[in-house]
Amino acid sequence: MPKKFKESYYKTVLGIVTDEDYRLINKFIFRVEENKHAQIDHIVFGEKYFYAIVSRYFNGNIKGKEEDKDFIFTNRKNKKFYTPNPYSKMNHLLSRLCLTSGLNPEMLIGIFLVNDDCKVEAQSTSKNIFICNRKNLKKLIKTFENSGVGKIKEEQLQNAVLSLDKLNRRK
């Protein structure tokens, strides 16, 4: 991913966390199998949900359905390639995170964050996994945080942050 996009993703996430007084763990690395690790770029701890965010840059557009094995990536020169299905990847990542951490899957939202100039045509019925352009991230999180779900108790929130921080292999 080009450095300028990586920085813009980080600034967007940091801005949301700062504005809303949420908590944040960046570059969360955890073991998913014996000798295999996975990375979540940002985990945002909101008042009602936790958001696992994986950032990707596409020099073109992506299209597909939640149940497809792969999505179709069309680059700027209009050449088509297959790319792994972001819903499948995120679903696997969230499942492993919940197994490893003990987090309640109903409190976890997976966000596959892409660059603003990437046109996304995705068909999905998922209620907890989303593909989102960077410019729409704040709106997506606000939608969940403004829902009728009760707030997470402060002690539970703090325990989740500390628990995940201990599991983070980035250190």
Image (spheres, rainbow, N blue to C red):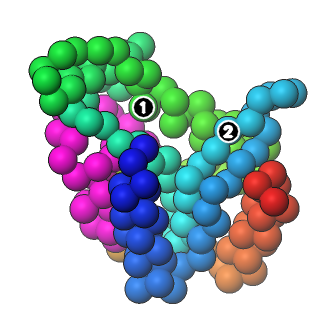
**Furthest residue in direction left, as rendered:** 78
Q: Residue at x 35, y 25 (%)?
A: 66
First in sequence: mark 1 vs mark 2: 2
Query: Which label is found at residue 38?
Result: 2
Local crowd at mark 1 within 10 Å, few (<14), some, or many (≥20)?
Answer: many
Q: Is residue 93 magenta?
A: no
* Residue 111 coordinates in the image, percent (x, y): 43, 49
Amino acid type of the residue tagged 1 in the rendering = Pro
User: Is residue 88 among what the camera can see?
Assistant: yes
- Residue 125 is inside the magenta segment: yes
The crowd level at tag 2 (other Cα within 10 Å; few <14, some 14-19, many 20+) is: some
Horizontal and vertical percent for residue 32? 75, 34
Q: Which residue is mark 1?
A: 86
Q: Which mark is residue 76?
A: none
**On screen, 63 above or below 166?**
above
Viewport quadrant of the C terminus: bottom right
Which SS class for mark 2? strand
Residue type, label 2: Ala
Q: Which residues are magenta?
A: 114-142
Toward the viewer: 136 or 108? 136
Residue under the image location 59 percent in, 31 percent down: 92
Residue 108 in view (yes/no): no
Q: Whole-percent x and y of residue 156? A: 73, 73
Between circles 1 and 2, the one closer to the viewer is 2
Labels 1 & 2 near each other (Cβ < 8 A): no
- In the rendered image, residue 126, in percent from the top left (x then y), is placed at 38, 37
